Amino acid sequence: MAQQKKKRRRNRHDPDRARVAAQREEARRRQREERRRAAMAQQRKDQRMSLVKRWSRMALVGAGVTAAALWFFWPDSEVEGVTVVPEIRAVPLAEGQTVEYGTSTPTSGEYREDAQACGVFDEEITTEAAATAVYYGAVVLWYSPDLPAADREALIAAASAYDSHVVVSPQEGLEAPIVATAWRRLMAYDTAAGVDEFIDTYRMRSPGDGDCPIGG
């Protein structure tokens, strides 16, 4: 009977066995190190993304604050020599109601909820209509009936340059040949020269938002 070969069992002190164990341990160590590095890299990436998002939010907030500051605090342009008139409380008028503004050329105060039609008027408009017009952003150009024809034609030409928000009206007893009014702004002129600057500066600069079509 053939003698069976006995399976050799490695001694725990066998160099080959120790080397294999060391290789396995080294492989496990490398895997742990790779996982640790990957986790640290992901953590750094997450931190960078969080920082970017935080700075982005801060930048957006900062931009919004800056825009708001510019909107609320940046001074609007003004025509040199213009009179800034104290505001009279602007509340809607009841139907058919009239009011005493204390001036024939109002620049604020009670107004009608239906916006005043704009354009050139041959007859004097009411103070209620004028207050309504400036509330909705119109420039009202008052002129004395004895204003020279050339200046009257210049006022009409100034109004005709816009499709809305300019009113031209005569008025008896003006303190100047021409009085230009807008929301809380008033300026007197001897001639029509310079009136276009007033229109460009103050037209559609008011708390109201409404139509005021020429001839509407």
Image (tube, helix red, strand yellow):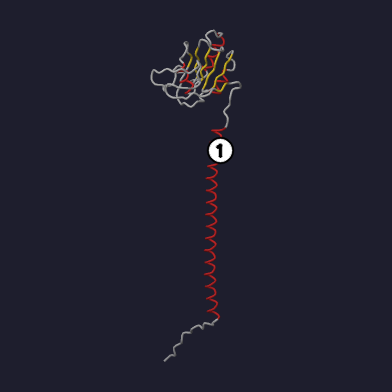
Q: Position of residue 72 (x, y in %)?
A: 54, 33
Q: Position of residue 7 (x, y in %)?
A: 46, 85
Q: Is residue 95 left or right of residue 148?
A: left
**Which residue position is annotated with label 1?**
66
Q: Residue furthest left?
A: 95
Q: Dot 1, crowdedness within 10 Å: few (<14), some or many (≥20)?
A: few
Classify 62 as above or below 200.
below
Classify 14 as above or below 85.
below
Q: Residue furthest bottom?
A: 1
- Residue nearest the observer in this picture, 74 or 57: 74
The residue under the point 59% across, 15% down is 193
Quarter containing the C terminus:
top left
- The amino acid sitting under disc 1 is Thr
Q: How many numbered marks, from 0 up?
A: 1
Q: Position of residue 79 (x, y in %)?
A: 59, 22
Disc 1 is placed on an element classified as helix
Q: Position of residue 115 (x, y in %)?
A: 43, 21
Determine the image quadrant of residue 13.
bottom right
The residue under the point 55% across, 47% down is 55
Quarter containing the N terminus:
bottom left
